[in-house]
Image (cartoon, rainbow, N blue to C red):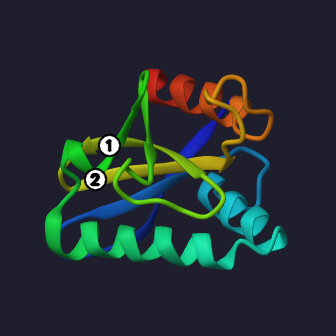
Amino acid sequence: MFAEIIELIHYKEVTYYSILLDGDKESLFHQFVNKMLEKRLNEDLAILKSFLEKVGNKYGAKKQYFRFENTADALPPNFVSTKHNLRLYCMRINENSVILFNGGMKTKSTSQESPEVSMHFHDANIYSQKI
């Protein structure tokens, strides 16, 4: 598998990146956004976007703003909730760099048991190990 890390957006404190897999036209993050828009989860996406902007412009990508998910991390953190228990898997490189992967709605008690996010959880951990 060949992949390219691409810059998505640069804020004052944090630059967000994503991965473009060989043969794909959209990054993993854009695949996530488009899938959530198709499911009409605009409110949940707005909450996530607002959080990414606040971290990016004001706070920096400190550990407390991420959910620990094995090798990878997830957003939003426990203190930010979305209506549909949204999960976006990512890798926090440091306080200034974060790679955003893919995700979905967590419907079970663990990510591994949730049909929509289990594959993304697994993939995010693999990507994080390889990076």
Q: For label 1, count other residues whose C-alpha is less than 10 Å away and answer few (under 14), some (14-19) or many (20+).
A: many
Discs 1, 2 touching: Cβ within 8 Å? yes
Q: Nearer the viewer, residue 125 or 41?
A: 41
In the figure, residue 68 lies in which quadrant? Answer: top left
In the figure, residue 73 lies in which quadrant? Answer: top left
118 to the left or right of 46: right
Q: Element type at marker 1?
A: strand
Residue 131 visible, this orientation: no
Q: Amino acid at mark 2?
A: Ser
Task: Identify the residue at horizontal 44%, vertical 54% (top origin).
Answer: 76
Residue 5 visible, this orientation: yes
Q: Element type at marker 2?
A: strand
Q: Nearer the viewer, residue 131 or 32?
A: 32
Residue at the spot of label 1: 92
The mark nearer the N terminus, 1 or 2, is: 1
Residue 101: x percent and y percent? 56, 47
- Above/below status of 68 relative to 30: above
Task: Identify the residue at horizontal 70%, vertical 38% (top origin).
Answer: 117
Q: Which mark is residue 69?
A: none
- Above/below status of 36 relative to 107: below
Residue at the spot of label 2: 97
Q: CA distance from mark 1 to mark 2?
A: 6 Å
Q: Amino acid at mark 1?
A: Arg
- Above/below status of 7 relative to 76: below
Q: Nearer the viewer, residue 79 or 8?
A: 79
Q: How many numbered circles does the render carry? A: 2
Task: Identify the residue at horizontal 26%, vertical 66% (top origin).
Answer: 55
